[in-house]
Amino acid sequence: MAVIDGKALAETIKLEIREEVLLLKEQRKNIPHLAAVLIGNNPASESYVKSKVRSCEHVGFESTLIRKDDSITEQELLDIVKDLNEEEDIDGFIVQLPLPKHIDEQKVTLAIDPKKDVDGFHPVNFGRMAQGLPCYLPATPFGILTMLERYKVETEGKHCVVLGRSNIVGSPMSILLSRKAYPGNCTVTLVHSRTKDLSAEIKRADIVIAAIGIPHFVTADMVKEGAVIIDVGINRVEDDSRRRGYRLVGDVEYDAVSSKASLITPVPGGVGPMTVTSLLLNTLSASKKEIYS
Amino acid sequence: MAVIDGKALAETIKLEIREEVLLLKEQRKNIPHLAAVLIGNNPASESYVKSKVRSCEHVGFESTLIRKDDSITEQELLDIVKDLNEEEDIDGFIVQLPLPKHIDEQKVTLAIDPKKDVDGFHPVNFGRMAQGLPCYLPATPFGILTMLERYKVETEGKHCVVLGRSNIVGSPMSILLSRKAYPGNCTVTLVHSRTKDLSAEIKRADIVIAAIGIPHFVTADMVKEGAVIIDVGINRVEDDSRRRGYRLVGDVEYDAVSSKASLITPVPGGVGPMTVTSLLLNTLSASKKEIYS
């Protein structure tokens, strides 16, 4: 069994991006510029956004953080989005979700210019992804593809089971691993809460992508010997031995499953750190106008 | 075994649309108006477009056929698309594919206003479909969903195997049958040319969607007793006994498979007639501004 070290891989990729940015500076070219919009004081959102901004600084990107109180109206937020769409100096931006209840998240997502939608949430980017056209890939699926690629995981003809059908992980992951490309060309089964015999389905998989949001859902008896296990879950479970009263666990019962897997991602330190990397790669791509001219 | 009579179902739906159009006329409301652009003299394209225009007339829609010689330049075609986008009287339009080689099909598809993209080929509509947002569904998948619905096929928790991963049938079909809706909530496996043991995969299916484009690919030994078989293939095979020298067959060996299936679509007369119905339903929806305001 080998472990996919997402934290180390993310650092490697950040170094590569940093080198490229240094080169852009030398050539007096456009330096990638990411803006992030943070509404309210949700501690998780705050921590995500800060980590994104810090990563930008780390690789030499310019960054702008726009913070607003959660009393902001929908129209005021839409105006900010409009300004960011028009601001030539900004290559890409994200609006951190969730938004306060009085704001329609879908309306805000649809208002973002697809050219600057480095989160890859706009239907145009999602549709382009599904149709195999150049696009900004959503962060988590992009991070997983990068992992599979860098760890040289053979995917062609492999049976892959994707557990969970969310718009941000399961559904795009099933689409991407089915496509005629590497990583891809898998035979993909997408399973979910309505699937009849989840265990039997997972047992058939050469590659398991667990994104169901239930702590330790995937147990050793469900997994085929030698399978590759990608654990997307980040679940809090109570743990009095920790100062903060909880610890983070994945959707996979790591200790038992890892002894059967050929390759596995830990939680934390697996898929998580790769999502910020994806955002940086999309922003770099936006600044070079690789997707949209 | 029962047969899904696509031809009869399409007629039923056309009658329903016709009734609705009569009502719209009585109420002096907007009558749906579809435009079709046909470039060159490809006999298959010509026959498809004519059938679409005829169906419009049949249900009481207004229709406009724009025919151009295949010497048309890409820019001239893009100008036609622009005019159709702007023409208020046109609710939806299609540009019949394939286009002559000197024209970039993707560029033309992307130029169509998603609001009028009743073929559902624009990435915005494809992405909205994949994200579960209101959209124009692509014709063939929409037709298949309608069949499953009208024949009250139970789909929840069923194992569905989609054979073929094209952008117009296999890929969207796999997405739609996975979604949390009816028809849907299936456990879907998308199989294709790189799948290792196609027969074994198909054998597990309660519902088979065959869209691989190979005549008689699915044989009786591959199919589970009692499966529902949807045959999307329309393949020409030589047949000297026919005046035109060929006959149309599906991707499924109909005679043998039908004796094991609980429900099956014939070719011709199955999925084929339903695609025009989908186009009419999308156009009706466009005229009522149900998707985009």
Image (cartoon, coloured by chain):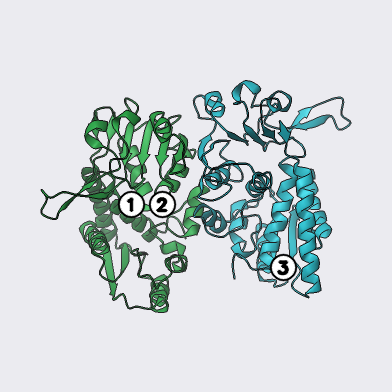
Chain colours: A green, B cyan
**Disc 3 crowd, CA 10 A, few/some/many (<14, 14-19, 20+):** many
- Residues tagged 1 and 2 counted as in contact (Cβ below 8 A): yes
**Is B181 situated left or right of A75 in this image?**
right
Q: Which residue is mark 3?
A: B90
- Residues tagged 2 and 3 counted as in contact (Cβ below 8 A): no
- Tell which of B213 and A252 is nearer to you: A252
Residue A278 tag number: 1
Farthest-out residue, right = B243
Q: CA distance from mark 1 to mark 3?
A: 41 Å
Farthest-out residue, top = B221
For the residue marked with disc 1, what is the amino acid?
Answer: Ser
Q: Position of residue B286 (x, y in %)?
A: 66, 64
For the residue marked with disc 2, what is the amino acid?
Answer: Leu
Q: Which residue is mark 2?
A: A137
Height in image: A226 above or below B161? above
**Is A267 situated left or right of A159 in this image?**
left
Rendered-image quadrant of the N terminus of chain A: top left
Chain ID of residue with mark 2: A
**Is A196 situated left or right of B239 in this image?**
left
- Residues tagged 1 and 3 counted as in contact (Cβ below 8 A): no
Height in image: A229 above or below A239? above
Whether discs 1 and 2 lie on one chain: the answer is yes
- At 79% from the left and 45% from the top, the residue drawn is B8
Location of residue B36 (image quadrant): bottom right
Q: Position of residue B130 (x, y in %)?
A: 51, 52
- At 38% from the left and 29% from the top, the residue drawn is A203
- At 75% from the left and 54% from the top, the residue drawn is B38
